[in-house]
Image: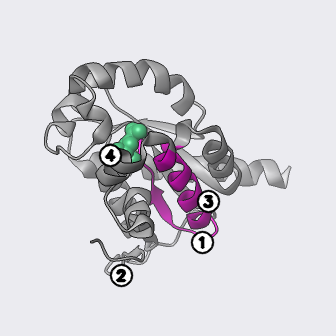
Amino acid sequence: MPAPGPDMAQTAPHQAWTPPRSVVLVGLMGAGKTSIGRRLASRFGLPFVDADHEIEVAAGCTIETIFEMHGEPAFRDCERRVIGRLLDRPVQVLATGGGAFIDPDTRRLVKSKAVSLWLRAELDLLAERVSRRSNRPLLKQGNPREVLARLISERYPVYAEADLVIDSLDAPAEVTVETALRALRTFFAHESEKVGT
Ligand code: S3P
């Protein structure tokens, strides 16, 4: 069973700038939310939290088991409650499961308490990445590539409501991290300009 608690990026070199609100990564399975989120947190010297991991800790079982035993609606309830609690914590980087931001209540909460960053990726890249793991219940409901294609058409218009969007590329993670850092700095610089006017 995974251990509870945030993953502190203690070895990070201290950075002069950290975001004033939590950064919440959204996007489809395989977009790289955990990998990019962990690296971003490390660059900021902030805690990194993975919502799926916290859901497993809270439920005392894996996400696969929650889907199997209780179904997707129960998983979504649990996800909403856990993310609600996590967003009450001090500034952090939070990676969410692919369906979290699609839930209207979770989306409202994320938008009011954090800055949301959509990691957008193309179907080929997602399909290649998800093929490395076999513990995602939704991808067992059919051909994984077809499921992902359907989710792209259903979810991309909703992810587009995120505050920021950056492309998750088939490149070293640090390339995407640099793009995310620039996007975040620009976003908050504009926000403080607006407050100042
Ligand atoms: C889901 C994505 C998964 C996990 C669950 C449902 C989804 O998280 O929350 O299997 O609805 O897209 P990842 O996006 O981290 O794989």
**Which residue is under mark 3?**
84
Nearest to viewer (mark 2 / mark 3): 3
- Where disc 1 sits, the SS reads loop
The circle drawn on residue 10 is 2
Magenta span:
74-100
Q: Position of residue 159 (x, y in %)?
A: 52, 33
- Up the image or down, 89 lies above or below 187; here it is below
Of residues 2 and 178, the one nearer the viewer is 2
- Up the image or down, 115 lies above or below 43; here it is above
CA distance for labels 2 and 1? 18 Å
Nearest to viewer (mark 4 / mark 3): 4
The circle drawn on residue 89 is 1
Of residues 65 and 101, the one nearer the viewer is 65
Q: Position of residue 20 (x, y in %)?
A: 63, 64
The disc labelled 4 sits on which kind of residue? Glu
Q: Residues within 10 Å of mark 3 (few under 14, many from 20)?
A: some
**Whether residue 8 can be seen here:** yes
